[in-house]
Amino acid sequence: MCSKLILNSYKIVRKNITNIIILACFLFTGCSLAVPEPDEANQTLLIIPVESRQTLQKFIWTLHVSIEDLSSNEKHNHIIKPNPKSLFSYSTQLKPGKYKITKMIRKANPGFKLGGKKKRRPEKVSNLDGFELKKGGVTILNKKFLFQQPQSKLGNPPKRGQNQRKMTDHERNLEKTKRKKERKTDQEEMKKQRVRFVQIVDLDESFKTKLLEELKEVENYDKWK
């Protein structure tokens, strides 16, 4: 009797686990990108075209842009996360009106650092026209943000304690000095690549076509004018 109860309990648990696994697979593979439906909290939809050219495993920074309301001079911060799998960033938090993107600055993701000057200042945006947002309508910028992150030849530093337990203090100091020289050489090589991390460039027709095709697959996008 006891063995039968144990067997039945095992079958029930195994069945539930199977259902959970199936549900998880459905959620991770079947869900597509969605934007909010137009309502009083989401009155406008701003689409910012984005192209991300990635050479590392992942981008180590995000771009913070300042969007200024031309009527009140109020500034809004919008964060764009570079993602090679998506061709745009969007915002539904702006009220109807006329705006302009005035400044942008790169900020390192948690756990990473950006090389160069210690104190970074926002870069002024001068080659992007102003735009108007209408209630219940979509506005697509006429230019795109091009993100590039050049490949560094310098590998990740060894983790704390890794390959250092058998080192003497003298050997550890030599390793730090060597690493410092390698980092300096790597930074000089990166400068020679002359890759601009962020550029605002014209929308070419092929990219525009791909963007519009992607937007068609976005849930609730067709509910905006």
Image (cartoon, rainbow, N blue to C red):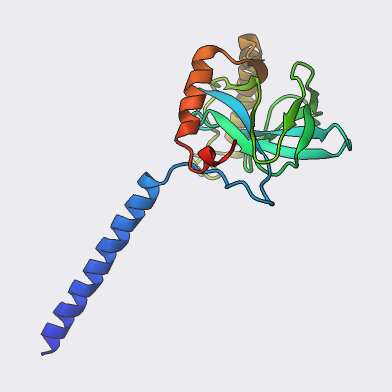
Q: Identify the residue at image location x=86%, y=39%.
A: 74
Up the image or down, 182 lies above or below 161; here it is above
Front residue (pair 178, 32) = 32
Measured as percent of width and height from the top left, residue 45 is found at 64, 38
Q: Identify the residue at image location x=70%, y=35%.
A: 107
The answer to whether 18 appears left or right of 213 in the picture is: left
The part of the image, by quadrant, that contains residue 185 is top right
Question: In the image as oriented, which residue stretches furthest toward the bottom?
Answer: 1
Measured as percent of width and height from the top left, residue 5 is found at 16, 84
Front residue (pair 182, 152) = 152
Front residue (pair 26, 183) = 26
Front residue (pair 78, 95) = 95
Q: Would residue 166 be seen by someone viewing this image from the given angle?
A: yes
Q: Identify the residue at image location x=66%, y=42%.
A: 92
Measured as percent of width and height from the top left, residue 66 is found at 77, 33
Up the image or down, 35 lies above or below 193; here it is below
Q: Quadrant of the C terminus?
A: top right
Q: Identify the residue at image location x=30%, y=58%.
A: 21
Up the image or down, 208 lies above or below 47; here it is above
The part of the image, by quadrant, that contains residue 190 is top right
The answer to whether 83 appears left or right of 127 in the picture is: left
Count of numbered tags: 0
Q: Would residue 81 be seen by someone viewing this image from the given angle?
A: no
Measured as percent of width and height from the top left, residue 17 is found at 28, 65
Up the image or down, 129 lies above or below 65; here it is above
